[in-house]
Image (spheres, rainbow, N blue to C red):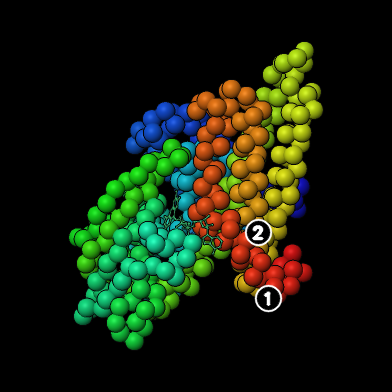
Amino acid sequence: MYGLSAEDLAIQARARGFADELIPFEEQAEASGAELPADVTAGHAKRARELGLHSTNMPPELGGGGCTTLQQVLVQEQMGRVTNALGWVAATPPSWLPEVATADQIERYVRPAISGDREECYAITEEGAGSDVDAIEATARRDGDAYLLNGVKWHVTSYNSADFAFFQARLAGGPHDGEHAMFLVDLPSPGVRVVRTPAYTHTISHHHPIVAFENVRVPAANLVGAEGDGMAFAYEWFRFERLMVAARCLGAAGRLTEEMTAFAATRRAGGGPISDHGLVAGMLADSLTELFAARAMAYETARGIDGGIDTKVSHAQCSMAKLYCSEMAGRVADRAVQVFGGRGYMRENVAERFYRELRVERIWEGTSEIQRMIIARQMVKRTPAALA
Ligand SMILES: Cc1cc2nc3c(=O)[nH]c(=O)nc-3n(C[C@H](O)[C@H](O)[C@H](O)COP(=O)(O)OP(=O)(O)OC[C@H]3O[C@@H](n4cnc5c(N)ncnc54)[C@H](O)[C@@H]3O)c2cc1C
């Protein structure tokens, strides 16, 4: 099905097998605030690397998997079947970085990220700048052979486990005054501190603290690309990550569809299995129908990228995939809770966990509203036929 090659099917099967190894840890993760014993987490990370599921998106000459975009989607789809972000051990470092990184940055950041020795986090969003990234107020001021960074960043995912941060700021002074630039900041660094760590809806081990950067001095060698390049990297990352969000949503919806079907076929009420009741059957059928459409869309988007489609077209298609797959998964999770009845409201049930966890997929990496704005803008500029 879906015209997958033998290689595609092999990596998909490997990823599915790994997801099946992770699933038994979900309830323990949920009950413990996602704090699994360190040796268990380290074991999962090691296994992901051994199976070739880590850094699938990175170039092989640097130690990455060099997978096609479609294969990256297939892997992330399987990781999406697992709750509590246990599948995040199959990490995807920023694939745009090797092309713009200096030789020194490749050694200090790119290779260690690919090998799993160093982990990154992204400090871009601020209290007054979320959807509107251009509104950031963080500053970077050149000071001799260094830059001084200042700003307060929100929702810095994985800060608690990260070894370095991408910090986006507005240049203050110099020939590119007011333009954006991106910096690599080692963690910990003098002047970087957690303001507070709010609790979020999901139960995962990755925190999203508010982090203050106060007169943080980084060498000029830590500037990524050139002054003024900051926004270009953000856009490239969005394109990639939106498709991977879509992929993980396919996995979640796939798992939920399997689990609710199995339950509905065996749970008896009113003299027979609940799947015999038309209203329950409708929830099953609608879920698989939407999943089929979403999967076809995400795979086709990936194939387009592998085939060298125009970047602007793929930008809109990644937005469509993210929008549709995340909203589809949200609807499937809602139905799954309903099909499981009271059990679906218990934290030990996969439907309950996904019902909470999937909500953020419509918010991060650009909200559903932002995706709709991007798609509509491209429709007007390029015609609907050019995009789909
Ligand atoms: C769990 C979590 C983890 C995150 N991790 C990171 C991270 O690691 N690094 C990072 O930098 N950021 C991170 N973010 C931030 C995330 O990208 C932003 O929350 C998101 O982009 C939305 O921004 P906002 O929250 O400021 O909402 P706002 O931009 O204030 O939007 C509020 C509402 O207004 C709507 N809206 C805004 N502008 C428009 C418009 N032009 N047209 C139509 N509607 C609009 C939005 O869709 C939304 O419904 C994370 C967020 C969460 C919740």
From the top left corner, tell me how far across and down residue 19 is, in percent.
Answer: 55, 38
Kind of residue at badge 2: Met
Q: Position of residue 211 (x, y in %)?
A: 30, 55
Q: Which residue is rendered at x = 19% and y = 60% of the image?
A: 190
Q: Give the answer, above or below, for where 244 lies relative to 106.
A: above
Disc 1 marks a residue whose amino acid type is: Lys
Viewport quadrant of the C terminus = bottom right
Q: Is residue 244 shown to the viewer in this render?
A: no
Disc 2 packing (10 Å; few <14; some 14–19; many ≥20): many
Closer to the eye: label 1 or 2? 1
Rendered residue at 27%/58% (across/down): 212
Vertical order, 38 against 388 (above or below): above
**Separation of disc 1 and disc 2 at Cα?**
16 Å
* Horizontal relation, residue 349 to residue 104: left or right: right
342 is higher (above) or lower (below) than 87: above
Q: Assign a secondary structure to mark 1.
A: helix
Q: Earlier in the sequence, mark 1 or mark 2?
A: 2
Q: Which residue is mark 1?
A: 381
Q: Residue at x 75, y 43 (%)?
A: 289
> Which disc, if any, is residue 320?
2
Judge whether residue 311 can be spotted in this image: yes
Q: Position of residue 175 (x, y in %)?
A: 34, 87
Residue 359, position as x, y percentages in the image: 54, 44
In the depicted view, which residue is nearer to us: 212 or 310? 212
